[in-house]
Image (cartoon, helix red, strand yellow):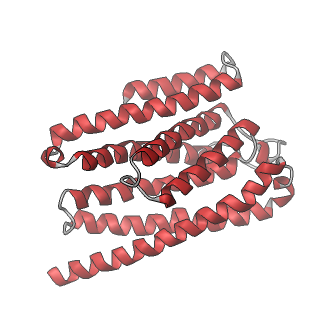
Amino acid sequence: MVGFGLLTVGLIDIAGHATLTKEQHWLLSVFLGIVMCKIVHDLTGVVSSVFFSGYAKLDKQGKLEWNNRGFSTFHAIVVAAASLHLLIASDLFDAASQDELIVNRKSPLSDTILGISIGYFLSDLAMIIYHFPVLGGMEYVLHHGLSVFSIIQSLLSGQGQIYILMVLFTEITTPFVNLRWYLDTAGQKNSKLYVCNGLALFLGWLVARILLFMYFFVHLFSHFDQVKEVYTLGFYSLLTVPPVLAMMNAFWFLKIARGLIKTLTRARYRK
């Protein structure tokens, strides 16, 4: 993990000093995302076999999904933290910080994060398709396909990165989704941690994938004069892909809400 972090910092530093061409930077970032998935996938299996006795009892498919969720959690934490930094902590998208249109703003770090995410989504999509439907159904194929399609466009064109980063921040809910699966698999469905995680997942999903998407659309249409400057395919992608993702998030939110109600009802009857 430390080595991966140093490699990431090194990549950003090198790109910032223009040692790499932008095309080399993009390809290296995507490659870094793929390597990240492989390293974390393997480390998840090694660490789990040492610290979780139940891991050895899982069948081949169970171990496959366990390790897969390990690198999806790691990716979610990395891109959510980086997106939050770029959107709020940095002045990259501050309206008063520069004269460049908001839809045209980017940085070496934002390009790196988009490249890493492309590498992740390609890796995860390949695993989903190869092991279909063990790791997820067609809704996951659709979600990942739309994500790769949108992120690649933004990376290559340098446009609309603010909106891609908003969507990538919604990955912050992924660790809660994965922890829910881990606890269920470990037979901890009746534990207090399972209940607390369910509440956190519900609230996190509400904020990050429902309310944030509402803000996304408000921001999009309040800056529509700038959005119209995006090249044709990117412009129409901004108008069509986010609504599809929003509907998928709303559908999953209803399932999460029903699951939370069942969990809280079970917990009340056990008292």
Where 63 sits versus 25, above or below? below
Q: Residue at x 72, y 36 (%)?
A: 156
Q: From the viewer's perspective, tell me whether residue 37 is left or right of residue 237.
A: left
Count of marks, rendered view: 0
Residue 67 visible: yes
From the top left corner, tell me how far across and down residue 165 is, in percent: 62, 48
Residue 27, by quadrant, is top right
Residue 271 visible: no
Q: Which quadrant is home to the C terminus? A: bottom left
Q: Residue at x 15, y 43 (%)?
A: 56
Q: Nearer the viewer, residue 27 or 137?
A: 137
Q: Which quadrant is home to the N terminus? A: top left
Q: From the viewer's perspective, tell me whether residue 93 is left or right of residue 54.
A: right
From the top left corner, tell me how far across and down residue 106 is, in percent: 71, 38
Where 182 sits versus 249, above or below? above
From the top left corner, tell me how far across and down residue 205 is, in percent: 47, 65
Q: Residue at x 84, y 53 (%)?
A: 226
Q: Nearer the viewer, residue 130 or 110?
A: 130
> Which residue, as the protein is rendered here, is positioned at the far top?
19
Q: Residue at x 68, y 34 (%)?
A: 107
